[in-house]
Amino acid sequence: MTAVGEARPAEVGAPRRRSEDARLITGRTRWTDNIQPQGTLHVAFLRSPVAHARIERVDVEQARRRPGVVAVLTGADVAGEQGSLPCAWPVTEDMKHPDHPPMAVDEVRYVGEPVACVVARDRYAAVDALEEIDVDYAPLPAVVDMERAVRGDDGLVHEALGTNESYRWVFENGDLDAAVRDAPVLIERRFVQQRLIPTAMEPRAVLCVPEGEEFTLYSATQIPHILRLMLAVVTEIPEHRIRVVAPDVGGGFGSKLQVYGEEVLCLLLARRLGRPVKWTESRSEGNMAVHHGRDQIQRLTLAADRDGRIRGLKVDLLADMGAYLMLVTPGIPILGAFMFNGIYKMDAYSFTCRGVFTTKTPTDAYRGAGRPEATFGIERMMDELAAELGMDPIEVRRRNWIEHGEFPYETIAGLTYDSGNYEAATDRALELFGYDRLRAEQAERRERRDPVQLGIGVSTFTEMCGLAPSRVLGSLSYGAGGWEHASVRVLPSGKVEVVTGTSPHGQGHATAWAQITADRLGVPFEDVKVLHGDTAISPKGMDTYGSRSLAVGGIAVYGACDKVVDKARRVAAHLLEAAEEDLEFTDGRFSVRGVPEEGRTIQEVATAAFAAHDLPDGLEPSLDAETTFDPENFSFPHGTHLCATEVDTETGMVRIRSYVAVDDIGKVVNPLIVEGQVHGGLAQGIAQALYEEAVYDGDGNLTTTTMADYLVPSAADLPEFTTDRTETPATSNPLGVKGVGEAGTIASTPAVVNAIVDALRPYGVRDVPMPCSPERVWRALREARGEEAAERGAEPGAGGGLGSAQAGGDQ
């Protein structure tokens, strides 16, 4: 117990090791696949080997005769009860939204779509029996290329819709025609955001346990509360009879922000068979069936003056929906609509997005969800503008960004940035990076025509975090609110339980929420227990995604703590025979102002409240409270990331020599957790720039189904990171916190690609398609110099010096 007058060290801001880690790293985890109720049956799914076909016949008789097989079902067998998987974000009134059966009935529309399932006494018997199912497919045209798909050149994914265009969403502000008209500088570029596969450490897994007319569904999900509601909607099983538990969840990155067919089908199978039913995907199965991310074609037009001031920006997107619209599929590129302007001021802005159906795995949220795509677009364009003007990339950004004294600032995209200091973050990044020294080295290498050229990439970014407030989301037709709920109870023994509606899958909520609670209540960190991820324990919540947990869920915990203190103050005042306004609350202890020796700890007050022997009239026993927090605005973290790459112009090999990230995420609760989040985000953003891509052939076959084909970098493939922070508190919540979970991913991809292009710009290279593999870098050099020049080894400068790229072209 802290002595009277002795200040307790603050928990918020302390780099505590995560309290959950000891259990996780020693294998004492509770993954969904570890849970094995008595009598559990196992499910395996037969998945379509073709991208597009009519199902003519499914013969399951041989599979039913296999040893250990309990049931074999086709889509037709469950057609009357499986419903259609939900899309909760109809972005336009006329959006085309086809039915999406959890298991295909008449037609398959992507490789990996389930067409039948086997239920057996063990998973091996179930998988083996799949080989005995015979399916006749009548092939239909594969629709793979987005630009051809939107024109209907290769046929229709959903013939009844009459088009492959799901929706067209437009936002305009300012007179873009006037901004473009007679603009001294007009730059047009085409960038491709390649398709990515979320690769969480834990594959998806589902276990459904029937208990009479009630069901407990365990799932490796980010969204237990949303999943429970959607399961009720899809299956028509009453919501109050479904309990969803997200036990330990080994990562998600957006891939587990979903309502999957396998979850629906396990629930239906458990109801039909009256026994627990489990499914766990293999890695190659997951690569086909987990929703994918990104996959956009961006056409950008930027108009500017010769002094570098931006006049206007036009964005035209094609966004690949895949074969169906899943939970928030159509809204992902719309999130980017509010971020293409980045941190910059401009007179006019136009954004148009067309969602396009293809015969590929559906897309949906992937770490950053729309904001990485937008940040990539504007940050690449800022480098293109700098090159056209022969201006330093930092300088062109300084001439356009919102200055520290201009906050709060209403952007051209209609958002109000509440706080920021781009100058401070950039100055600190330049200092840590040694920017001037590296620029001098770059000039020297170019002068001596070094075959290994140095490139310097810049990314000055902001993002919108904390998916909220509810009214804003409602205006965008988003099908859920942005609020979050928490309850806090001080137990009779003085220990504290926190119940949160957020559902962590690696973020460290159990530690950070305990730190907030310990500070607000003045109790030891070790005395706080955080409960989450179970709709029976935490019945209210909107779950975890979009860097919302701290800025929304953490603030709900903060508010519930303050309500507990307010209630405890009434009890303490009664016990001390003092007026409430005469009490001070410091380090967990109430005392009478001017008489510090007269007091009660909050634990003592909790005991008294539980006993209820002497409470103020009208006050209920126990010391607990709950709060729902709905923010008034998003939060807007920002930062400056700088990357130095060495690019071998003879082999195309790229090596990241140094990487500096200075982020401003407002008030920091736990610096150690923040560092982990930033490092993980950087790894994923760099992976997009250099390694990862989901590749389909012309017939719609995914050719990157294993980790031998789909390149996920290890620690050995990544550089050392230099990270630091500036601190500009958010004004939209009392802690001043912003989001950090996606910052590294959003900022790093353009920083790396800008560095590669910067190294190659003297050769005439203006873009290298991602991932920037050695072959693609090599090919970009050959194309820029011409085959003949490449064969004889053109020297730096053959394609023109810095700033020589002509505006108005299309890469």
Image: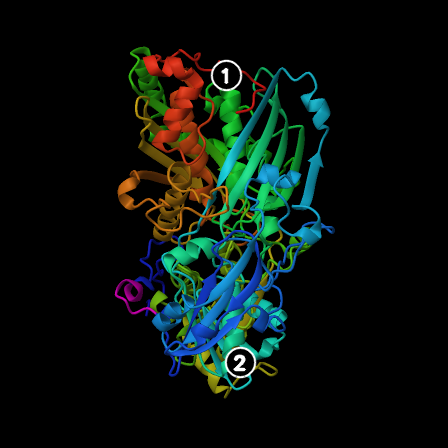
Q: Is residue 261 left or right of residue 595?
A: right
Up-down relation of residue 481 to residue 571 (above or below): above
Image depth: mark 2 or mark 1 in front: 2
**Between 195 and 574, the one nearer to me in the picture:** 195
Q: Which residue is mark 1?
A: 805
Q: Is residue 221 visible?
A: no
Q: Which residue is mark 2?
A: 272
Callout 2 touching callout 1 (CB < 8 Å): no
Up-down relation of residue 165 to residue 221 (above or below): above
* Amino acid on which the number 2 mark rests in the picture: Arg
Name which of mark 2 and mark 1 comes first in the sequence: 2
> On the rendered image, what quadrant is the N terminus found in?
bottom left
- Residue found at x 49% / y 25%: 383
**24 in magenta:** yes
Q: Is residue 414 left or right of residue 669?
A: right
| Residue range of the region highlighted in magenta in the rendering | 22-29
